[in-house]
Amino acid sequence: MDKKPSIFSQTLSDIEAWVSVRNEPAYRAMQVQQWLYRKRVPRFQDMSDLSQRLRGELERDFRFSPLSCLRKTGSRDTTQKFLFDLGDGNFIESVLIPASPALYGLPSDRKTICVSTQVGCAYGCKFCASGLEGWTRNLEAGEIVEQILRVEALSGEKISNVVFMGMGEPLANYQNVLTAIEIIRAPWGIGIGARHITVSTSGLAPRIRELADQPLQIRLAISLHGATDEVRQKIMPVNRKYNLATLIDACAYYNERKQQRITFEYILIENVNDGLDQAAELARLAGKLKAKINLIPYNTVQGLTWKRPSQTRQQVFFRALERSGVEATIRREKGHDIDAACGQLRLQSLRDKTFAGSDNLR
Ligand code: SAH
Ligand code: SF4
């Protein structure tokens, strides 16, 4: 693979610094960003208000290779999944979700993209497809940004919300994720406001504190999935490193500094974390942090034996939360049929080699 840095990893000030050493006026940097994010040209040669020399130098110093889409599932008005080839033998996926009111209370005409931040994941949660094959590498900031650009181009939709809930642990790729967020938010970049961006973490407590110290009003979601150490550490090895007390302290620190309320993501898995004892503890933790709870019925993963509880059991759990006065929603199912949970399309494709011969959608 071309080892030059991706042009989509560069912030405006990065390009300003790059043009200034070439004795070009600073506004050239803004011109470059406008070609990339407003006009969305596919190559440096199309940046017609830059000199040939400057276009040539951009080409020499930066990579401009859009992710190529190997497979797309779903259709308009449903959840769509995109499998991308990173060009180095690795694959990631992005999901486009017509946002339902249950998902962060947003109106339903909104389109939410779920982006990946790493190839694989080192955290090995027992229920998760992304963790199954381990961690391969971090995504560059530009590879995160490009997922949005490519999905907009392939779907014809304008994306209004970004959730960092695809493959990988965003806070384990902290610097690149922060750079990507800067580019996603910036008026010269994609221009999606911080309040429409949600970062989800399995609970990297020290990073949550660092994020709290950033002047950013993004939303934070915590993958809790267990309300006691005993239950949580059965399914999330990260809990041995940062136990619930440590995690909740970090969340409290985040709350002190931010206006946005935290969301607890809670997958319901049959006979693992769906008992009323867990509901009571979960309500207590959420009450303490004024957190909202997002219940997610578990999506089955090929090769894993975990199951989602029956509708009745899901409702009993949900009502118990409601009765205790905390704000809870149960995620309306989008895309269960096309394996919407993170990492699943990639995993399926790696196992089923037929995708290698399918049409390149680029
Ligand atoms: N690593 C981060 C973000 C990616 S996972 C995190 O763990 O928060 C995004 C969300 O999908 C997490 O809440 C995760 O627990 C959930 N998830 C993983 N596998 C799932 C499955 N099979 N069914 C439903 N949700 C799943
Ligand atoms: Fe990694 Fe998140 Fe999956 Fe856990 S749930 S293995 S942290 S991607």
Image (cartoon, rainbow, N blue to C red):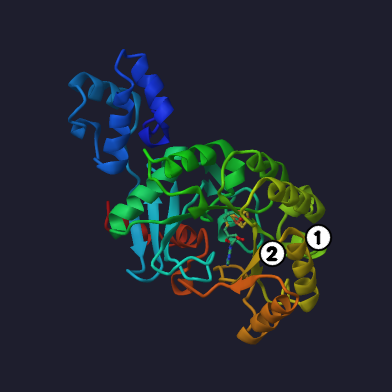
Can you tell which quarter of the image residue 6 is in? top left
Residue occupying the point 28% across, 21% down: 57
Residue 95 percent across, percent down from the top left: 43, 60
Q: Residue 340 placed where, x, y %?
A: 48, 66
Label 2 residue SS: loop
Does dot 1 land on a helix, a strand or a loop?
helix
Work out whether residue 4 or residue 78 is closer to the camera in this orientation and state it: 78
Relative depth, front residue between 132 and 278:
278
Q: Which amino acid does label 2 sit on?
A: His
Q: In which quarter of the image is ligand 1?
A: bottom right
| Residue 104 disc label | none
Against 111, residue 189 (above or below) is above
Amino acid type of the residue that numbered disc 1 sits on in the rendered structure: Asp
Residue 204 visible in the displayed image: no
Res 344 seen here:
yes
Do the residues bearing badges 1 and 2 touch, measured as CB atoms within 8 Å? no
Residue 288 appears at what percent x and percent y? 77, 61
Dot 1 surroundings within 10 Å: few (below 14), some, or many (20 or more)? some
Q: Which of 254 and 143 is in front in this view?
A: 254
Please give the label number shown on residue 225.
Answer: 2
Return the x and y of residue 212 as percentages of the image width and height. 66, 43
| Vertical comparison of 277 with 169: above or below | below
Q: Does the residue labelled 2 lie within 8 Å of ligand 1?
A: yes
At x 33%, y 69%, the residue is: 75
Camera-side residue: 263 or 131? 263
Q: Name the residue under label 1.
A: 229
* 87 on left or right of 50: right
Q: Is residue 168 above or below residue 265?
A: above
